[in-house]
Amino acid sequence: MNAQQLVLKQRAELLGALCGGGSAEPLDCVLDLLLAWEVLIWEDYLCIRVAEKPLCSNARQLLDVVYDKGEDACSLLLAAFHQVLPEEQKDGLCFGKGCAVMEKIRPSSGTSVLLIDRPVLVRKLRDNIDEALNVLLTTGCFTIKDCDGVQLPVYTPSQQVRRLLDQVRFKGETAAKTLLQYLEQTEPTRPNPEDEEIKLSAECLIYQRKLQSSVAAQSHFLSTYGGTGRFSLDDIYMDGLLEVMNGSGETTTLGLEDVVGPVGTLNEDADTVLVSGEAGSGKSTLLQRLHLLWARKALHTDIIVLFPFSCRKLNAEHRELSLKELLFLHCCWPDRGQEEVFQFILDHPHLVLFTFDGLDEFKQGFTDEERNCCPTQKVPVPILLFNLLQGTLMKGVKKVVTSRPQAVGPSLKRYLRKEVLLKGFSPEDINCFVKKHHNDPALAKRVIESLQGNTTLLGLCHIPVFCWIVTKCHHELLGGEDGIPQTITDVYLLVLQHFFQRKSPHPQGALGKGWLEEHLDTVLRLGQLALEGLEASCYVFSGYELQRNGVTEQDVSIGFLIYCNDLSVTDCKRYEFLHITLQCFFAALYVTLNCNNDRSVIPKLFQCQYRQRSGRSHMCLGHCIDRSVEDEVESNLTEIPNLQITAQFVSGLLSQRHHNLLLHCCPAALRERKVKQVVKSLSKGMQRHFKSIPRPVEGEKKSMHAMPSFVWLIKCIYEMQNNTIAQAAMAKLEVEHLKLTYCNIGPVECTALTYVLRHLQNPIGLQLDNNSVGDTGVEQLLPCLHICHSLYLRNNNISDEGLRKLVEKGINCESFQKIALFNNKLTDACTQLIARLLKSKQNFISLRLGNNNITSQGAEQLAEGLSCNQSLQFLGLWGNKIGDRGAEALAKALKNNTSLIWFSLVDNGVGSAGACALAELIRENKTLQELWLNKNCISRDGVECLIEALKMNSTVKDVWLRGNNLSPEEEEELSKQESRLTF
């Protein structure tokens, strides 16, 4: 079969290889090679790689273009696939006989070299793009606008490099030769990794292969949710949204390999990378994918040996160990040459990677008080772990640690190289995950339609573990009699029902109305085990612990507990719950349904985060577990998030909507008492926050900066689904501004916030900057928009679609007057919507759309709305691409405006023509006080126009012009002519 026929026959498989992981990197790598091999010309590339189109559309276009070019082109396409795809994705694909890439004469032009050497240049520039941009900027080949366009946070480092190469080629020969010259100059100082390649001894090579085989075997199947079926990680894995924040608070999107790369480094002297995310966000699965890629040699890194650790399994290690014993006993035992292998590890720390999954599940909180620098000295495992993380032991070894954010205190953060935020699934990821999970396209379509028809459930699915649950329980979801799940508790009851249904002896597995009562004994046994484990920060259980709690083999066979594959040498079986959140859910079921626990259980559960963190403390739920003597446990941050999740589930289980389900499982009087305890605990928790609100400074609004525990209380109230409780909570909140920045607010939290905030009596400003709201979260906030006079959503991954929903609702909300959407994903498409808002609302005061992707076309559309509005006072458009044409349109629209006070066009590529148009605005407008034009391209002519205009306007107080095309001498001279100019 010739190459053209192979491309045609394997079209679906090739598309799957390019698009299956949701990342554009495989497509971009194939395009790089085809450009270098001259299969594609530049026009082909521009036609294929269209940013506005979906990834799958671009991939189809590639296959169509190459197919039309004939046999040789198809042969080279298959060769490119063979070079780019990891080994596991090549299975089942046929790449033909291959086609030799002909050696061509080196082109003389720099722009042509950029194409011929494109794959190599992408690798070379990836780690030093900042230096390259600086060279292009200082030589005048690039402007500040060009640099910022390359480094937009939405691009991964590899995408930034490709944008740089595309822009350099567009700029012409001078820019191309400048970049190539820079690379030639830096080449001698940057050692070639191939020249530095370490020659492994026979013993080390044997050990590396054994370690790779062991890690590959353990990573091949999805371990986290694998108890109900064995899923190949390749078939089910989806990249979540990964972001890293720089020192200025700006975020950059990362790929999986960037986790161990240099991008986003804040502390060059540290070795530990923290991957933080909420429970169920996919941290363990991400590490598993990283392990699998390394084991298959598909991870583009110089790591030779990788040692994976589970912190929950390290909890079970009570012996004192040396570093050598930790590596060889808990990861992989060398069959021979132990000393030689260990010496290699000590001698080459930069070629070693340690991963520690679930630091938040480690019993002991991080401390740097006890030091250990000796790799052969035996010490307790916590001391060994903490010295590895801070670099006292094995300095230079890369370490990747996963944890929930609440469990990482300031003492550990001092030793972090960078913190990577894992933010779960995007709407596109959810659809792709469902399709991957279901082979039947019709069924997948029904599940997706069901999710899209219920934004609350869709919001839950942004957290991967909930997405898995909903996908797994599709029968109950699509055919349930109790309606679509609304809360997290609803979703986990769906899981409970699903697992019991699988083991049901009834025809077709149907469960009766009393299914929970029927399985109550199993639930209580598993619940007691779960709660006891949470109290002791224990997540792995021995057979003895199961036996002590009465857990039977039949209980285990249902699937909530799975066998724990332990790397360490041990003879006893160990078990763990499918997921930590499931352990919390069973603990909550025990607290709710157990008739023997005393009255203090629920109050103590809700007060766990307020306990004094002394060195030793008694178990806060000791009386809930029927044991005569309780061991003392270390009080630390790690147990609090799990107890909070448990309290959230208790709130949900005691809601009125589950009254009938629990009716015969717990005496009515006992249930009512527990409900009152939860309500009282939530009320007390809210009062603590309200009492902490400081008195407002004179002339400022009364505001409250809510802490994460406030969000938890709100989520508990939402789980109870009780309007009376929500109303009572908000009746005591007397603030004008509620600040919830950096609180990990996603769509789930937005749903809960809306449920409670809609009961506020007076409008407030709601500040949700630097969270993960997204378009789905915006939709969840709409029911409380009428009670918001201001909405701040900076850096929240919001697109034009999210803004569309916001505007449609906001137009009809009288109180809604201010919006801030800095650093999102807005384009020119949003400006028509904003224009409509400005035309409709003559009380709108503030609009801030900085650092998005708005061009002159968008500015012209925005100008239409501005010309009809006489209320706007603050207009912020900094960091876009508005240029002279856009500035002229805006200036014309605002000439006769009678309300504008503050206007920013910082960093928008505005030149002297735009400045002259803005000078006309200054001449005519009588209210403008501040005009910000920093980081533009304005020359002396433009500034002189502004000076002439200022002579006719006494209202303007400041015009900011820092970072424009002026020499220091010109700045000094012009500032003397007009004191209101700031350079």
Image (cartoon, rainbow, N blue to C red):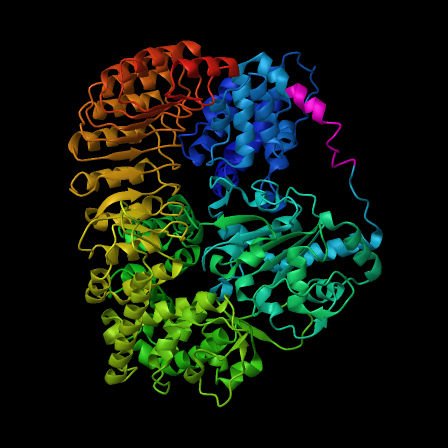
Where's residue 363, x and y in %? 56, 70
Does residue 150 sit above or below 560 in this rendering?
above
The mark total stands at 0
Quadrant of the drawing holding the C terminus: top left
Where's residue 364, x and y in %? 57, 69
Rendered residue at 52%/59% (across/down): 409
Does residue 146 sit above or below 369 in this rendering?
above
Most foreground residue, 550 or 974: 974
Q: Is residue 837 left or right of residue 909?
A: left
Q: Residue 608 occupies which quadrant of the picture? A: bottom left
Rendered residue at 28%/34% (across/down): 847
Where's residue 505, x and y in %? 37, 77
Most foreground residue, 535 or 336: 535
Q: Residue 4 occupies which quadrant of the picture? A: top right
Most foreground residue, 154 or 447: 154
- In magenta, the rendered stretch is 180-195
Is residue 189 shown in magenta?
yes
Rendered residue at 27%/67% (across/down): 720
Residue 337 showing in the rendered view = no
Residue 261 showing in the rendered view = yes
Does residue 891 sit above or below 259 in this rendering?
above
Is residue 311 shown in magenta?
no
